């Protein structure tokens, strides 16, 4: 007999065996007890959380000969459901049967009575893949099917369904299964299969499966094939190209210390070993979050990822931990927009390193000359209070400049122009502008420039400078939109000229655009395909 995958072998055969989803089990069980059966159901939620399994269990409960609502698993109806051969339970994959002809064929057969059970049940998986015409062909039947017909629609993307479909079904939202339930299910399977396993290995599988029962069992199946009858933590790490906690903590230490050589070499090594970039980023986020919580509570019991030893030995400042957390989370959110994840993560590491690695030490080392006397008396160092220098107030002339507008004519910097400016970028001038940026806080505005100052202070950073062009990065789209208006150019130029002493044409990129174009620049440079440069002449006229 051919091997049967674990997720198929241990598919739940009764409601009691379902991992998680107790709110749905309870609701359906009560509906069966009260004989309140709807004509159509929608089971929606993440993949691998039990939607199709629940649909089969519900179908089994409707037709079990042991009584309405039971799953005896021994009567002809239950056995036929288990074997997948029940003539009255029709499963259809809408991904491959999505057209109007498929649905017309289904509708034409709905009128026939069940042959073996009391109910005829149609389970349509991935229902969101159906065409609009197919949905329309199903509508009337879905609203008023024969009394002995039940439709169960399953989908991972309910928002793609037509409102007319959603209004005709009872909707059940499946949640990701809790780590506790997944771990208990994996332990049960390992016990049944006679597998000796480390609990830490199962916890790692639970973490990787992200709330999916099917994924967790598939991973366990693969891990057993790799390790044999004894499964340990290092087997999972080797199989899925994962880094150890020690490696990840050392990586964070290198970022904190500004050790570019170490983290750059380590990242290349991890990538060459097939490490999942998204998973690595998420793991680093979890570690930093643990360390930050511990830094504030000093409570070992709440540590989820980090060990007690690691918590005691790491000495990151709260400021650095917060910056790491913000930057890593922001980078993770950008992965869906780019194709080269490793380049984006490397940019993230460089950003963290340049900020954290340059932080002034909290306590400076003081060298004391040794004396001849056998005893050394330590004298306390008195703290010298320094008077804070008064902020220099800079007045900006707003003569002839209109107020900031919220609607106008937008100007966008083309990808070609951006890469051209990057090629001719002046790093020294960029650093000079960055050093001048805090002067925005000291501006005393008069007239119409207050809005421009606030706009630049809110979420903008100088990114590229070339001759007379300054490219800003805006963290938020609505900020970038205002900066891009040609009508706002004079005010922006005036404010930047006030703090830097030089006039620039001001252009802007959103955070996503900037990351994307930096990546393309590096890709072209690494491939030796950077285009020829041309004079930077960008004039934005009102």
Image (cartoon, grey):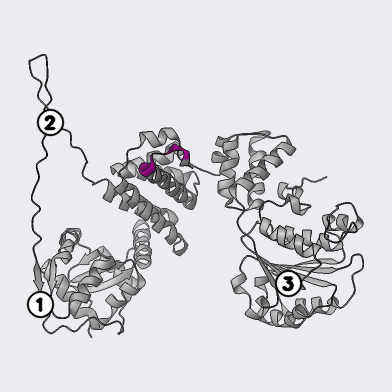
Q: Earlier in the sequence, mark 2 or mark 3?
A: 3
Residue 162 sits above or below residue 53 on the image: below
The mark found on residue 380 in the picture is 2
Mark closest to the chain's N terminus, 1 or 2: 2
The Cα atoms of the two marked residues, 1 and 2, are separated by: 51 Å
| Quarter holding residue 405 | bottom left
- The residue carrying mark 1 is 397
Q: Position of residue 241 (x, y in %)?
A: 52, 43
Where 350 falls versus 141 (above or below)?
A: above
Q: CA distance from mark 2 to mark 3?
A: 82 Å
Q: Residue furthest top?
A: 374
Question: Magenta span covers which residues?
Answer: 295-301
Alpha carbon distance from label 1 to label 3: 68 Å
Q: Please identify the residue farthest to the front as the structure is shown.
A: 34
Q: How many marks?
A: 3
Q: Nearer the viewer, residue 277 or 427?
A: 277
Secondary structure category for the residue under label 1: loop
Q: Nearer the viewer, residue 93 or 527?
A: 93
**How many other residues sit within 10 Å of disc 3, few (<14), some (14-19) or many (≥20)?**
some
Quadrant location of the N terminus in the rendered image: top right
Q: Say which of marks 1 and 3 sits in front.
A: 1
């Amino acid at each position: 007999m051919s091997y049967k995958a674990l997720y198929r072998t241990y598919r739940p055969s009764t409601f009691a065996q379902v991992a998680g989803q107790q709110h749905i089990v309870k609701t359906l069980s009560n509906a069966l007890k009260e004989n309140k059966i709807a004509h159509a159901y929608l089971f929606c939620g993440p993949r691998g959380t039990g939607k199709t399994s629940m649909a089969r269990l519900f179908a089994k409960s409707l037709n079990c000969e042991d009584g309405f609502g039971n799953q005896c698993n021994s009567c002809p109806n239950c056995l036929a459901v288990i074997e997948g051969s029940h003539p009255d339970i029709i499963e259809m994959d809408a991904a491959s049967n999505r057209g109007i002809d498929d649905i017309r064929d289904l509708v034409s057969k709905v009128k026939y009575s069940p042959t073996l059970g009391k109910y005829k049940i149609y389970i349509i998986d991935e229902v969101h893949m159906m065409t609009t015409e197919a949905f329309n062909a199903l509508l009337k039947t879905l609203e008023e099917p024969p009394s002995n017909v039940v439709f169960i629609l399953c989908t991972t993307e309910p928002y793609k369904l037509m409102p007319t479909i959603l209004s005709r079904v009872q909707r059940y939202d499946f949640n990701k299964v809790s780590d506790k339930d997944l771990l208990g299910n994996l332990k049960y399977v390992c016990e049944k299969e006679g597998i000796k396993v480390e609990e830490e290995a199962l916890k790692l599988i639970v973490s990787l499966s992200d709330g999916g029962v099917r994924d967790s069992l598939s991973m366990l199946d693969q891990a057993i094939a790799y390790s044999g009858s004894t499964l340990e933590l290092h087997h999972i790490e080797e199989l899925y190209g994962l880094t150890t906690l020690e490696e990840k903590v050392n990586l964070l230490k290198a970022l904190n210390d500004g050790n570019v050589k170490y983290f750059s070499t380590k990242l290349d090594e991890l990538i060459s070993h097939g490490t999942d970039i998204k998973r690595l980023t998420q793991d680093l986020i979890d570690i930093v979050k643990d360390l930050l919580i511990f830094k504030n509570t000093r409570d070992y019991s709440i540590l989820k990822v980090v060990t007690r030893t690691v918590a005691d030995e790491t000495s990151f400042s709260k400021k650095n931990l917060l910056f790491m957390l913000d930057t890593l989370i922001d980078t993770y959110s950008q992965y869906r927009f780019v194709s080269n994840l490793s380049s984006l993560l490397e940019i993230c590491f460089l950003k963290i390193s340049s900020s954290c690695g340059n932080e002034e030490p909290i306590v400076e080392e003081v060298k004391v000359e040794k004396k001849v006397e056998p005893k050394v008396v330590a004298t306390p160092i008195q703290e010298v209070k320094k008077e804070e220098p008064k902020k220099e107030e800079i007045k900006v002339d707003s003569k002839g400049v209109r107020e900031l507008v919220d609607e106008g004519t937008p100007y966008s910097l083309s990808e070609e122009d951006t890469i051209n400016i990057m090629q001719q970028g002046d790093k020294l001038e960029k650093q000079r502008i960055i050093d001048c940026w805090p002067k925005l806080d000291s501006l005393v505005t008069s007239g119409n420039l207050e809005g421009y100052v606030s706009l630049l202070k809110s979420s903008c950073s100088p990114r590229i400078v070339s001759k007379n062009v300054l490219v800003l990065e805006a963290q938020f789209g609505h900020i970038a939109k205002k900066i891009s208006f040609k009508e706002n150019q004079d005010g922006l130029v005036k404010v930047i000229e006030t703090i830097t002493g030089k006039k620039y044409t001001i252009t802007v990129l959103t955070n996503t655009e900037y990351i994307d174009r930096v990546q393309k620049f590096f890709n072209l440079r690494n491939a030796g395909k950077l285009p020829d440069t041309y004079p930077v002449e960008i004039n934005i006229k009102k």
